[in-house]
Image: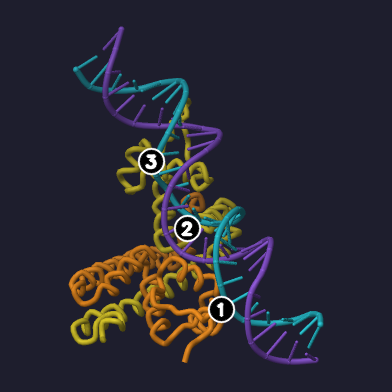
Chain colours: A yellow, B orange, C cyan, D purple
Amino acid sequence: MDYSIKQVAARTNLPASTLRYYDKSGLMPLLKKTEYGTRKYSEMDICWLELVCCLKDSGMSLDDIKAFMLLCLEGSSTSEQRREMLEQHRSSILKQIEVLNCSLGTINYKLEHYNEIGIFHIDTK
Amino acid sequence: MDYSIKQVAARTNLPASTLRYYDKSGLMPLLKKTEYGTRKYSEMDICWLELVCCLKDSGMSLDDIKAFMLLCLEGSSTSEQRREMLEQHRSSILKQIEVLNCSLGTINYKLEHYNEIGIFHIDTK
DNA sequence: GCTTGACTTAAAGTTAACTTTAACAATTAT
DNA sequence: ATAATTGTTAAAGTTAACTTTAAGTCAAGC
């Protein structure tokens, strides 16, 4: 029922070195090891890891993810704080999408008008 | 007609140290200085700088921005290459938006189901 | 005339998120 | 039995994009 680091690496597309780094950084608080020190990832560990990836891929720092995790470990008394963190993070994602759409608009404009005016003023001479 | 580094900092929301760093890194090839070494930004310099910000804010590395700039300086013979770079960058932006939307979906789901199942499996016990 | 504020430089320091290295242990394949 | 594979650790190295520091120049206000 448990997975080796290599299997988890294949499943998450993270290198094993990164998985070890996350563990070492305290991001995998419930991860168990065999008597010889080999990590064994349970379904729950992988589930948490996938949330870590989701938060990281949308720009949350590992420090903030860890803070969120510590709140999770404290139990239901911190649920309001956690909801607050997630709501702030949602805002951050929406802001990032907005910035990207703005840049996308500029790039699209440049591409559409490429032959007319060129990209850099020096070309218009 | 020219702007001081402080004025440009105010306009772009970049600290003066960053503007100096960009210049030092070769990202401002046409920027002039007074006889005493003080930078004077022309409208064209600011225009280019704003494109730099647009590309940087959408995740292009300063190295790639510089490569793009060097192509610009080479003139119209590189326009096809530049178009190619911009098209690749557009793809990269679309991909980033896709990833963010995916994360957003997960966060929204978590927030909607917050009271039902909790965020971390440990809470469900 | 002297201090204050805006500017300069080169060089060193910072931060986040890894990645690499070296040395070693255990498991599996031939 | 031996070689390849998979795993471990601690510690050092890497990269990008800045930021800070120290020491100095120049122009303006009191």
In this rendering, position of residue D18 left or right of residue A101: right
Q: Quick check: do tags 3 and 1 share a chain?
A: no
- The answer for which chain carries disc 1 is B
Splitting the image into 4 quarters, where does residue C26 fall? top left
Name the residue rendered at 38%, 38% in the picture: A5
| Residue B49 - label | none
Residue contact at pointers 3 and 1, CB within 8 angstroms: no
Q: Nearer the viewer, mark 3 or mark 1?
A: 1
Corner quadrant of residue D1: top left
Please give the chain letter of the residue carrying mark 2.
B
Tell me, yes or no, whether dots 2 and 3 are on the same chain.
no
**Kind of residue sitting beneath label 3:** Ala
Measured as percent of width and height from the top left, residue B69 is found at 32, 71
Q: Are marks 2 and 1 in contact (CB under 8 Å)?
A: no
Binning the other alpha carbons within 10 Å of mark 2 as few (below 14), some (14 to 19) or many (20 upward) gives: many
Instruction: Return the residue nearer the eye: B49 or A30.
Output: B49
Numbered disc 3: secondary structure: helix
Regarding residue A105, the answer to whether it shows in the image is no
The picture places residue B52, in percent across and down from the top left corner, at 38, 74
Q: Which numbered disc covers residue B119?
A: 2
